[in-house]
Amino acid sequence: MASFRFHQWLTCEIETEDGTIGIGNAALAPTLVKQAIDEWFAPLVVGEDPFDYAYLWEKMYRRSHAWGRKGVGMTAISAVDIAIWDLMGKLVDKPVFKLLGGRTKEKIPVYYSKLYAGSVESMQAEAEEAMQHGYTGFKTRFGFGPKDGMAGMRENLKRVEALREVIGYDKDLMLECYMGWNLDYAKRMLPKLAKYEPRWLEEPVIADDVAGYAELNAMGIVPISGGEHEYSVIGCAELINRRAVSVLQYDTNRVGGITAAQKINAIAEAAQIPVIPHAGQMHNYHLTMANINCPMSEYFPVFDVEVGNELFYYIFEGDPEAQDGFLQLDDDKPGLGITISDKHLSNFEITE
Ligand SMILES: O=C(O)C(=O)C[C@@H](O)CO
Ligand SMILES: [Mg+2]
């Protein structure tokens, strides 16, 4: 996998005759997704009733099925569907989570998600700093994989051990591979990682290797998580039914929007597989709030733009900041509760 960067974002607006505007978004391949929406999906939904959202989802899904079931097509459907749900919330003056299942948590527990691979000292310092903010879960990224051989394995293990030295063993430590390993390497690493009691090992293999996921998860050494690069209800149902993951992590702005995510939540709950959506962003927080089977949220701390996960904070206003390891949603903010910010517009090259 090349280096990980998200430095573009798509926003999608749907306006009703009375001037109410619903806002959707997508982070994957924004320029391609924009073209798909402008040329293919917008004409399918303009003039329709947003409250017919299940029909509209199926219409977009079936009219693009030949090319859009995964990747750019489903990401475009996700952005449009999120805008529809934001719109519906605004039209009935309710937050989206109140349309899904309501408040299942007094506040949402979050895990700190950054700790990109760097020097042992820098990662320990970052973890120390994060600890001061009350987080009880921490996700780190591996920096070494199959091409780095045994020496790379040692470097990976050294950093996991160093983080455990800082956070101890009473807090969750999640390990992120971002599809950078393969089945052979992951099978060799799992027994070496076990003693550090990871909460999960994330995306150890490429998204298409569902058999590999299932084999690693069946080893029962470390819970395997994934799903942020899976698309549609049926795509996620396969991960669930094949027990390919112990934690499902779809991203609502990829998997098919809120309409698809809520159906997936029901299937995951029936299988008793927890759902912890990828990305600390509003479209995911509402699903976590509304579902008992979503125990916590990922949280990208607010930082200067580096990798791009944090870009959301510079595009939108309204995303809650974590306090002492929790975040809160507002019962009185209709829709998703975010607006497009004009604070940083000059830093962006806008394509309408
Ligand atoms: O946050 C995650 O789970 C991601 O996969 C995105 C990126 O941070 C790479 O780790
Ligand atoms: Mg991930």
Image: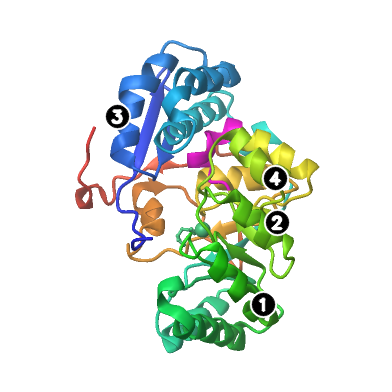
Distance (Cα) linking label 4 and label 3: 32 Å
Q: Is mark 2 within 8 Å of ligand 2?
A: no
- The percent coordinates of residue 34 (x first, y second) are 32, 32
What is the three-letter code of the residue carrying label 3?
A: Gln
Position of residue 131 relative to residue 271, above or below, is below
Looking at the image, the residue that sits furthest to the front is: 184
Few, some or many C-alpha atoms within 10 Å of disc 3 (few <14, some 14-19, many ≥20)?
Answer: few
Magenta region: 250-260
Few, some or many C-alpha atoms within 10 Å of disc 4 (few <14, some 14-19, many ≥20)?
Answer: many
Residue under numbered circle 3: 35
Which comes sooner in the sequence, label 3 or label 2?
Answer: 3
Report the residue at 75% width, 47% height from top. 292
Residue under numbered circle 2: 246
Residue under numbered circle 1: 191
Label 1's element?
A: helix
**Circle 1 or circle 3, nearest the eye:** 1
- The percent coordinates of residue 10 (x first, y second) are 34, 40
Quadrant of the image occupied by residue 268: top right
Q: Quadrant of the N terminus?
A: bottom left
What is the three-letter code of the residue carrying label 2?
A: Ser
Which comes sooner in the sequence, label 1 or label 3?
Answer: 3
* Predominant SS of the magenta segment: helix
Distance (Cα) linking label 1 and label 4: 24 Å
What is the three-letter code of the residue carrying label 1?
A: Pro
Which comes sooner in the sequence, label 2 or label 4?
Answer: 4
Distance (Cα) linking label 3 and label 2: 36 Å
